[in-house]
Amino acid sequence: MKIIKTKDYNELSATSADVVISEIRKNKNAVLGLATGSTPIGMYDLMIKACRDGLSYRTVKTLNLDEYVGLGADSPDSYVSFMRDKLFEHIDIDMKNTHLPDGKAADMQAECARYSALIKSMPRDVQVLGLGRNGHIGFNEPGTPFDSVTHVVRLTDDTVEANARLFACKDDVPRYAVTMGIAEIMQAKKIILLASGAGKAQAVYAAARGKITETCPASVLQNHPDVILIADEEAHALL
Ligand code: F6R
């Protein structure tokens, strides 16, 4: 795992945007694996700026990591809405090329199978990951098997609490989500793992230097041949 320490969040955003943008410049048909959450927002802002400066996303394809069960495009709290607000609506991407699991599917097992097949048919050139305080990647919580594929998960209390800030109140946070599995995350050719702030320092240490164990899902990334951990000074503090 290559580790890049940045002085602050702005530099983290610029460094991660550079990785993604250079991938698109190399290959206009690049497939990006994308994440939601606070951490990649600065990177998305710079991807929008690059579009305004002439970079085209018209033939880029995207696959997101996860979605809350029960939420869809009609909910402002869904990840599909997040991606539209933070990125897709501001760039020239063809919405048909953007994919997230459908949190409102009538049959979630069938939806997991559909999304797994889609992931298989669209090998990702680069996968962007945030990091949970408990070491989760996507919504693969501690204890998730490393060979997991897309599945429905019950979120841990820690994750519900961490995400409550984005909802009107904690009770509004869905208890279930559908997530790309760990085996599928690992299939991306390149992975960038982004972490910002002191609250992530412990998880960063466990991911990069800790024992490779299902107790810390992100530790599996030590087994991937092309991972860049991009952490700001506070998140990097224990390394
Ligand atoms: C989001 C996701 C999550 C987040 C993680 C960190 O799609 O898969 O794993 O990346 O919870 O979230 P933030 O960036 O809000 O700290």
Image: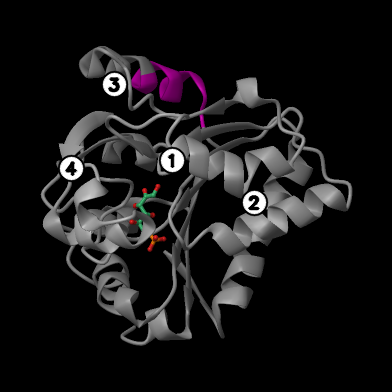
Q: Residues within 10 Å of mark 3 (few under 14, many from 20)?
A: many
Identify the mark nearer the N-term, 4 or 1.
1
Residue named by callout 4: 175
Q: Is residue 51 above or below residue 228?
A: above
Residue 20: assigned label: 2
Percent position of residue 217, x then y = 22, 53
Quadrant assignment, res 131: bottom left
Question: Of circles 2 and 3, which is in front?
Answer: 3
- Quadrant housing the N terminus: bottom left
Disc 3 marks a residue whose amino acid type is Cys
Q: Within 10 angstroms of label 2, few (less than 14), some, or many (20 or more) residues?
A: many
Give the quarter of the image for residue 95.
Answer: top right
- Cα distance between the residues tagged 2 and 1: 20 Å
The residue beneath circle 3 is 112
First in sequence: mark 3 vs mark 1: 1
- The magenta segment: 115-123
Q: Which residue has dot 1 on it?
A: 79
From the image, give the main secondary structure of the stretch colored magenta. Answer: helix
Report how far apart the C-alphas of labels 3 and 1 lie in the structure.
Answer: 16 Å
**Which residue appears at 48% of the width and 35% of the height?**
80
Comparing 1 with 194, the one in front is 194
Tell me residue 85's x, y (percent): 59, 45
Relative to residue 220, is residue 93 drawn left or right?
A: right
Taking the image as shown, residue 81 lies to the left or right of residue 204, namely right
For disc 4, the neighbor class at 10 Å (few under 14, some 14 to 19, many from 20) is some
